[in-house]
Image (spheres, rainbow, N blue to C red):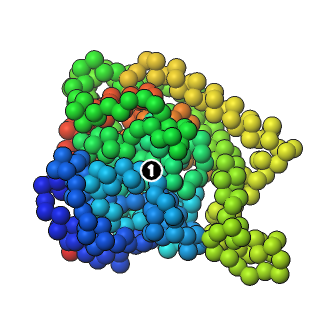
Amino acid sequence: MRIKDCNNRDISFIKEVDEKIHKSQDKLNAVVTFCNVDEQLKDYHVEDTALLKNVPVILKDNINTKGTRTTASSRILDNYVPVYDATIVKKLRDAGAVFMAKASMDELGMGGTNLNAYTGKVNNPWDLKRITGGSSGGSAALVAAGLAPLAIGTDTGDSVRKPAAYCGVIGLKPTYGRISRYGIIPYASSLDHVGLFTTNVEDAAIALEVLSGRDDHDMTSSNRPVENYKELLNSDLNGKTIGIIQNVQSAIQNEAITSSFDALVKKLEEKGAKVVSVEFDQDLMNTLLPTYYVISNAEATANHSNLDGIRFGMREEGDDLTSIMINSRTKGFSSEVRKRFVIGSYSLFVENQEKIFRKAQRVRRKIVEHLDEKLEQCDILLASAAGSIAPYPEDSFGDKLSATHLVAENHMLLGNFSGYPSITVPSDMVENMPIAVNLLGKAFDEVTVLSVAKAIEEICAQDDVCKEVCE
């Protein structure tokens, strides 16, 4: 499904889409809450020029929607109904979008598998037994199944780009500040980005144009003008320098993935790109994941201290305020989230801040400085998006001290530490499952990122591929 196809359809087809999404739930388990489509269509009037006219859109369940339950896939927020819309909800609606569903996610965004959602595992449309990746797994699955041309996610570590790789769709995380985060339930404020899923690069460019722009409700949003990303798409690679992150490719053990990647690199050269090898400091690459765990969980602990069963959310009984809070948080959060809060709290203890939290911040700065040095040589950095196809749940954690896990599975953290734009593009099929490559560019240079992604899309001929699950 493509945006332009929806633009040319009668609005009544939205009802057909709504029915298909409902039917998919038994197989995908990707939806937390279905939106009231009839209510939206009752007064639906947009200009013919509206970029998202007649377009069904999926929202990750951490995006506030006035009057529609928003749980962030957490039991503690099971009864939370926002009284206001996130800024991006208003932007999408003004552009003509019709909201179909709130999609499942790892609880509060804390996970990379979509296995710890309160509503259970989200199933990959290509193989229902495999994971989608997370935390935006529900959004990725619904686009991959051809049930919507656009879904919104959030990306704190690789939470849009990894599910996109596992599900065979486009996953874009723009520059930090390019899209407002007002009205989005946070995970880690210095790392959180709004991202999006589409079936093709052109639709990603259209969606980015709709979502981008300054928002005074979000003081981290940028004042930079919004570019006409679709019109500026140019897949000509002549004069472009693409750097291959060798640390990532060397850490991948799957020969089919590395062989496919090498074949793609040759085709990029044939199309005129200058391809160079880029070697990062291995010690810094090995620190990506532990640095992320410290910073993200410390920020999450602070951000979610208000989820106590007192001010709002699900409340468990207790003899006093302390016991109510303890009982509510114990039963309201999964063990994975509670573990992350323990890590975050420990690093924020006064006696630990300097030797743990501040040290992690300094390491992050060194990583970004090192990244900047590499980007001075290149227009784009390129690597395999993941070291494997989408795994089965029991295989999704791997050897956490191996180079494959530390580097090949977590290198996209570079885009969150730096805030630079990054996109995942489907590139091939291995064992009947999609694989992908990831591009990382310079700050606010989404045009180059999207243009090189378009060239890769043309080479790989993976445009608008979906896996039907509703037949």
Count of number-bearing discs: 1
Q: Left or right? Give the position of 251 relative to 54.
A: right
- Name the residue nearer the viewer: 399 or 123: 123
User: Which quadrant of the figure contains the C terminus?
Assistant: bottom left
Picture residue at 35% right of the left edge, 78% below the top: 26
Kind of residue indicated by mark 1? Thr
Q: Position of residue 262 (x, y in %)?
A: 32, 35
Q: Position of residue 393 (x, y in %)?
A: 49, 66
Q: Left or right? Give the position of 15 relative to 80.
A: left
Picture residue at 31% right of the left edge, 71% below the top: 39
Picture residue at 22% right of the left edge, 67% below the top: 14
Residue 381 against residue 317 in the figure, above or below: above
Q: Left or right? Give the position of 130 relative to 356.
A: left
Q: Position of residue 152 (x, y in %)?
A: 39, 54
- Name the residue nearer the viewer: 321 or 457: 321
Disc 1 target residue = 87
User: Outermost residue, right direction?
Assistant: 351
- Name the residue nearer the viewer: 201 or 413: 201
